[in-house]
Image (spheres, rainbow, N blue to C red):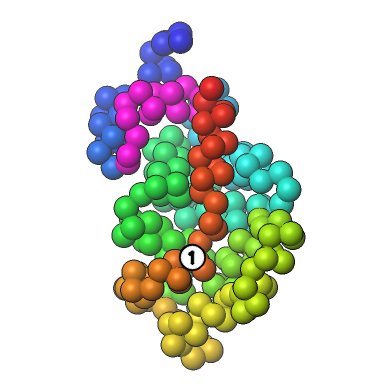
Amino acid sequence: MGNTKSSALSKELLEELKSNTKYTEAELCTWYQSFLKECPSGKITKEQFEGIYASFFPGADPTAYARHVFRSFDTNADGTLDFKEYIVALHLTSGGKTLQKLEWAFALYDVDGNGTISKNEIQEIVRSIFNMIPAEDQKKLPEDENTPEKRAEKIWAFFGKKENDKITEGEFIQGVMDNKDILRLIQYDEPQRIKDKLKEKKQ
């Protein structure tokens, strides 16, 4: 591996990512090399990010979901993800501590970024998740959650909210921690597939 200065990860960033994620130094350095190969500028644009997701889900349409995931990780709102934002994204979507994961999930569902979640926002994210579930698999879903509308309704009913109410971050996190079934309903259930794909890319 040709280790030129520009392709080396700074020690500060390496230490920060090691302490905040589950990745080892060797893994982070490997990620960084492949990140630079794909994105020589050191930044991933929204379009590139959508392309990465599209390669993970060839039989579905992950564009809308990828756009929401991108928004939730573009912490400085500059329209790109740098290596740090990218690694944090990987960590939280494939592992991450439950509380961190739920804080991220809240940011994902808070589409307009106003600090609360509305029923419309839940419907929007759930619809984008359904776009990634192959039609065959959708047929196998339980009767009361086999459409985006039904699943959003089930989530909303769990929080006991009226039609125009809002869910705060505290309510969201507490509610999901108290009920694992809601955790299943709010997330896209195949982080393993993403992890497998990333392993393939690294080899």
**Residue displayed at 45% across by 71% down:** 181
Q: Secondary structure under badge 1?
A: helix
**Residue displayed at 67% across by 73% down:** 147
Q: Quadrant of the C terminus?
A: top right
**Residue 116 position by quadrant:** bottom left
**Residue 146 position by quadrant:** bottom right
Answer with left or right where residue 149 lies relative to residue 93.
Answer: right
Residue 92 visible, this angle:
yes
Q: Name the foreground residue: 166 vs 20.
A: 20
Q: Which residues are magenta?
A: 21-35
Q: Name the residue carrying label 1.
A: 184
Is residue 118 shown above or below 20? below
Q: Name the foreground residue: 19 vs 74.
A: 19
Residue 113 visible, this angle:
no
- Label 1 is placed on what type of residue? Arg
Answer with left or right where residue 69 lies relative to residue 11.
Answer: right
Q: Residues within 10 Å of mark 1 (few under 14, many from 20)?
A: few
Q: Main secondary structure of the magenta part?
A: helix
Is residue 74 shown above or below 27? below
Q: How many marks?
A: 1
Q: Which residue is situated farthest in the bottom direction here?
A: 162
- The image position of residue 89, as x and y in percent, is 44, 46
Q: Which residue is situated farthest in the top direction here?
A: 2
Answer with left or right where residue 12 lies relative to residue 151.
Answer: left
- The image position of residue 95, as x and y in percent, is 39, 47
**Residue displayed at 36% across by 49% down:** 96
Q: Is residue 28 magenta?
A: yes
Is residue 162 shown above or below 145? below
**Residue displayed at 42% across by 17% down:** 6
Q: Is residue 4 magenta?
A: no
- The image position of residue 68, as x and y in percent, is 55, 57
